[in-house]
Amino acid sequence: MLTDCKLPTANCKLYTMSCKSCSTGGCGTRGLTEKTSGCQNNGACGTGGCNKMNVFDWLSDMDVPVMKRFDVVEVKFKGGRKEYFRNINQLDLHTGDYVVCEMASGYHIGSVSLQGDLVRLQMVKKKVANDENLKSIYRVATPRDLEKHEQSIARDLTTMYRARELVKDMKLNMKLSDVEFQSDNTKATFYYSADERVDFRELIKVLAGEFKARIEMRQISLRQEAGRLGGIGACGRELCCSTWLTDFKNITTSAARYQNLSLNPTKLSGQCGRLKCCLNYELETYIDALKDIPHVDAPLQTQKGKAHLQKTDIFKKIMWFGYENDSTTWHPISLENVNRILSLNAKGQKPVSLEVLEIEELVSLLPAPGINSDLAKMDKKFSSRDRDQQQSGNRNRNKKKKGGGGGNPSANAANPNKTNNPPKGGGEKK
């Protein structure tokens, strides 16, 4: 975002709330027409949709003299790609400022993503040497630089479509996923993925002749491709590889087996076509919990028949077994009883059945006699309330009897001829 723009106000609006790194016109990006692209949220997207690999500088509020600051700055380019440049001119930079950076041939414009001592830690983490090989930052981008940068971004999409047509015509077994032009339009980097080695020397000649730029072909993995393109995962959130995940570890189907997940490729695979990276997030927790689970290789032997293991609840410590002749009915057995049955089978003995063990477990869960449980307290409370209501009802009836034998005095006064004598013929028959 520009704060010291010398252009008229209408021109300054061109660069307000623009990420300048989104090839598809992502959330909050404004072009030369001043029309906001994407979801019309004007750059205030809470999820950082077009700002991949965002970082939080928690040391930004610390006042450090300019001369003592770490002179290397982390700069972010299109697709979340980050590189490190030396601030040789001691420029007063802020996170989000667009700077003109030195490249091997020409220059490129990126946004400042991190400064200070946190950059030193990131360089150690990514094993980047702090030596004379680091490129430098020329200056803060001017409105003219940003306008030229937008023009180079506008070429990315059309160039990719044309390059895909050339790849199809040459029958090359490769997939072009993204194109990035340098801000000076002197170099174009093509990102592709392929299962095998591809001879694209002829393709480079055709591309260089058609787009009048230096061509670089960079092969990326399928996970890196998904990270550059972005998307929404099955969980409803943005892809981990496009928001924060940078280290792609090896993932095997054993991670799904440890977590009792169905080995369904469509459910275990992500948008990249490989196993989901999130399968490794809770794997260590499951492995630690599995240490207490007994290993059942053979069916349990009971007098009723053989019981096969159907399901295991790792965290509740319960194992479900079913008989061979009745596979639809599963019996939950605790780990203690499973170990007891295994020890009995090892000695050649068999328990009666799994149902007996279930009853024993239910009896053991009942409250011990003499202990007031919550249910007993509620019974006592309501029984005392019923007793009080009964006593109050008896007192009311006694008061009515004392007032007139239970009759209605007003009713008798209104009918003086009415008596309480029984009707004739109502006596005993002799």
Image (cartoon, helix red, strand yellow):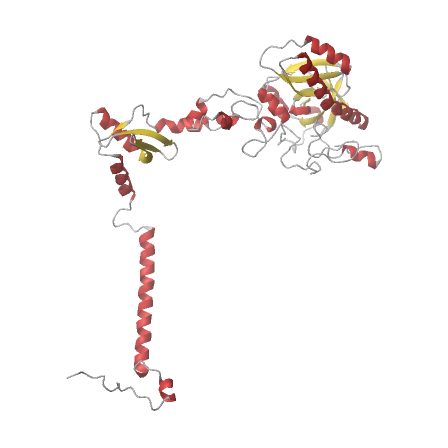
Q: Quadrant of the C terminus?
A: bottom left
> Which residue is painted at 57% across and 33% down in the image?
237
Q: Quadrant of the N terminus?
A: top right
Residue 319, position as x, y percentages in the image: 34, 32
Task: Tell me, yes or no, if residue 118 can be seen here.
Answer: yes
Q: Is residue 364 above or below residue 167?
A: below
- Residue 228, quarter of the rendered image: top right
Task: Tell me, yes or no, if residue 69 can be seen here.
Answer: no
Q: Is residue 140 left or right of residue 198?
A: right
Q: Is residue 425 left or right of residue 193?
A: left
Residue 80, position as x, y percentages in the image: 65, 25
Q: How many marks?
A: 0
Q: Is residue 90 above or below residue 313?
A: above
In front: 191, or 281? 191
In front: 207, or 120? 207
> Which residue is painted at 71% across and 11% down in the image?
204
> Which residue is painted at 30% across and 80% down in the image?
401
Residue 197, position as x, y percentages in the image: 60, 10
Q: Identify the residue at the far right of this view.
A: 8
Q: Identify the residue at the far left of this view.
A: 430
Residue 179, position as x, y percentages in the image: 69, 20
- Residue 12, quarter of the rendered image: top right
> Which residue is painted at 39% across and 33% down in the image?
315
- Residue 25, quarter of the rendered image: top right
Q: Is residue 186 left or right of residue 300?
A: right
Q: Identify the residue at the far bottom of this view.
A: 417
